[in-house]
Image (spheres, coloured by chain):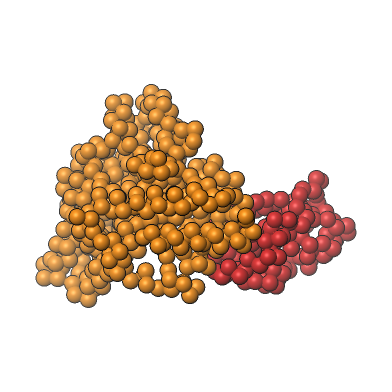
Chain colours: A red, B orange
Amino acid sequence: MDADMYADELIEQYEHPHNNGVIKDADGEMHEHNPLCGDEITMYFSLKGNQISDIKFSGSGCVISMSTASKLTDFVKGMPLDKLEKMGVKDIIDLIGIDPGPARLKCATLSLRALKEAAFVYEHRAIDEETKKL
Amino acid sequence: MAPDFDRLRDDFPILKIAVHGKPFVYLDSAATSQKPNKVIDAISEFYRAYNANINRGVYEISEKSTEAYIESKSKVARLINAKGMEEVVYVRNTTEAINLVSLSWGEKNIGRGDHILITEMEHHSNMVPWQILAKKKGAVLDYVALDADKTKLDIESLKSNLEKKPKIVSVTHVSNVLGTVNDVAYITKLAHENGAVVLVDGAQSAPHMKVDVKAIGCDFFAFSGHKMLAPTGIGTLYGKAELLDQMQPIFGGGDMIKTVEKQSATWNDLPWKFEAGTSNIEGGIAFGVAVDYLEGIGMENIDDHEKELTSYALEKLSSINDVAVFGPGRDEIGIKTGLISFAIKGVHPHDIASIFDSEGVAIRAGHHCAMPLVVTLAPEKAVSRMSFYLYNNMADIDRAVQAIERVRKIFKRK
């Protein structure tokens, strides 16, 4: 991997993450971890109607997983759940502006996976195959 | 006379590649070693010149492949000072060797309420097979604790656990996370005094030091070829012949039988009783070639070389801010092999390994298949590890130090 992906902006988000914390009585909540590297994350969201009105994450992990979670939480604020549920790998790569490569892709998609799972569970729907593959 | 280790580097073609435009430095030999030309060529030569199944053909190249395969077992037996090739069972790797003991010896000898004793510094391969056996049999799996500074086994904990009279003690010779060399001869002596059978996991010791299974006194010794210059898919379970004789095979099929009737069969002699089906013939032969190569250098020389590198690396690392190392330090180099797990404060090990990679230096990051230990070492529940072998040199360590400086720069450490 090229160290250029460690752009100052990602390091800044890693050390000062946005929306870091816990929502008590969240509408949706899901914990996910990457057993290979020990990254773990819990995503929380609250809804107004069908839109995400508040979102937080807590956890520990590498720059890629944590800074992506920070950016993702900013990105999905105000988003309707059905739009969130359509997000995939490409959206994450566009969001962070780098392709982390096969060895680190799971780090980048960990937060989206947890968030989408939380959305599916909230709606009492089965988690779709695309999400399971993230 | 000590060999010229720098010249040996020419025997390893992979060391000449470039990664991200930089000369490649390989510091992950504890995961798997690189291979010298002699081993690579032996595999190729087998397929080009005498590929034939073993132990049955009456034609010339089958006799040749059989002879080469058996000879490799004799070489492995000599390397670890086993009685002979009958005590050398070829398996895929250390994991399979330990599973063979838990499935065969364990099946027969472990019952409800029996104790099985392992330690907190085991690799998952010497943990999960015993968990499976304990659950199946209703046995109790106990752990020898580490000492307060998490570098060595706590001998008092060992002694108190032995009072529970475990049926088997299964312990690693060298920790793949800490690099600690356990005094397995002493542990075996105490375990035997308490009536236990002893298995030593030699995955991280056999490649790096002189191993003498008679001097250790253990009943089983497991190790992998791929960590000691041989290809993947070949490893050894050493067992005392009298124990192996009493054990049942876990796989049935060709080669492991003497006679077969419709309802029953009789087992072949050791070690073939445990090797059902066509073997990894080229792997076995290449394992023998790897052993020749290692013995040509001398295991004591390899041990000395790695200690020199480890001591140099520990000294360099101790002068860098925010870097912490785990396991025995320079003052205990006598009980440490050539691997160093480390952390850089506030930086996740995966990021460290990625930045090392961008500098052309391969290291490992994660839980190193020793989760119960690693989660206690660092808040990230993962550590970075650099590990050395005979083909590494001081310049490799300097490159690792440069990579750490790059990490510190990216993370704006002062």
Left or right: B349 with respect to B36?
Answer: right
Q: Is residue B263 above or below residue B226?
A: above
Residue at x-position 76% and y-position 49%: A21
Can you say whether B407 is above or below B265 in the image?
below
From this view, report whether residue B98 is shown above or below residue A129: above
- For this orientation, the residue located farthest to the right is A49
Can residue A70 be seen at all in this image of the molecule? yes
Q: In this view, does B112 lie to the left or right of B235?
A: right
Q: Where is residue B371 in the image (x, y as percent from the top left)?
A: 51, 46
- What residue do we see at 47% from left, 68% from top? B360
Q: Nearer the viewer, residue A35 or B55?
A: A35
Q: Which of these two is toward me, B213 or A85?
A: B213
Residue ID at (24%, 68%): B38
Q: Quadrant of the N terminus of chain B?
A: bottom left
Q: Is residue A102 left or right of residue B220?
A: right
For the C terminus of chain B, the quadrant is bottom right
Q: In this view, does A96 lie above or below B274?
A: below
The answer to whether residue B113 shows anywhere in this view is: no
Q: Position of residue B211 (x, y in %)?
A: 25, 45
Instruction: Find residue B322 and report its horizontal and vertical position in percent.
Output: 57, 50
